[in-house]
Amino acid sequence: MKEIKAFVRPDRLPDIVNHLREEGVCCLTVFEGEGTGHYTDERKDFPSLRHPFSHAKIAKLEVVLPDKKVKKSLEIIHQNGKTAHSGDGIIYITEVSDMVKVKTLKPDLHNKD
């Protein structure tokens, strides 16, 4: 299993999530945030009034997937998240060694197929 963390433009998030769902990815988490980075879109990014050090609104998507769904999910995030301008985001992929339910501490087999 792998965990994908994708930092993307908030306005691209609906297309990404809808296409992931069409591909059978049902369970994911989304966060709103602000960040700093080397590659910002000069056309859109403005300093935050709440966090003066920040200069970009971001959406963070997190999902744990079976290995066989990772490649297609990355393609979906890429195809639906890109604008060809600086600041499109970044994707992290990490290995997940185990996943258990909070309620029972038993393995969550839903994502292992």
Image: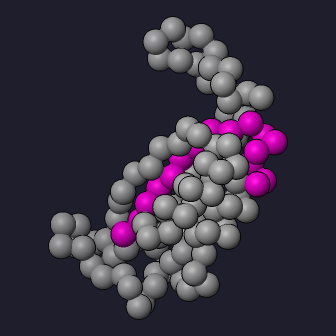
Vertical placement of 112 versus 37: above or below? Answer: above
The reply to whether residue 16 is visible in this rendering is: yes
Residue at image position (68%, 20%) is 109
Q: Nearer the viewer, residue 2 or 76?
A: 76
Residue 63 shown in magenta? yes
Figure colour scheme: one colour
Residue 95 shown in magenta? no
Vertical placement of 80 versus 16: above or below? Answer: below
Residue at image position (78%, 40%) is 67
Task: Provide residue 21's location: percent of width, then percent of height.
Answer: 61, 48
Task: Provide residue 62's location: percent of width, then percent of height.
Answer: 53, 46
The reply to whether residue 91 is visible in this rendering is: no
Question: What is the span of residues highlighted in magenta in the rendered image?
Answer: 57-72
Q: Number of numbered discs present?
A: 0
Q: Position of 10 compared to 95: left or right?
A: left
Which of the 4 image quarters holds residue 90? Answer: bottom right
Residue at image position (70%, 49%) is 23
Task: Provide residue 20's location: percent of width, then percent of height.
Answer: 63, 52
Residue at image position (76%, 54%) is 72
Which of the 4 image quarters holds residue 45? Answer: bottom left
Query: Which image quarter is the N terminus in?
Result: top right
Vertical placement of 75 versus 85: above or below? Answer: above
Task: Provide residue 26's location: percent of width, then percent of height.
Answer: 59, 40
Query: Which image quarter is the C terminus in?
Result: top right
Please, which residue is most extreme toward the bottom here?
43
Which of the 4 image quarters holds residue 27? Answer: top right
Please, which residue is most extreme toward the front here?
22
Please, which residue is most extreme toward the left here?
49
Vertical placement of 52 versus 46: above or below? Answer: above
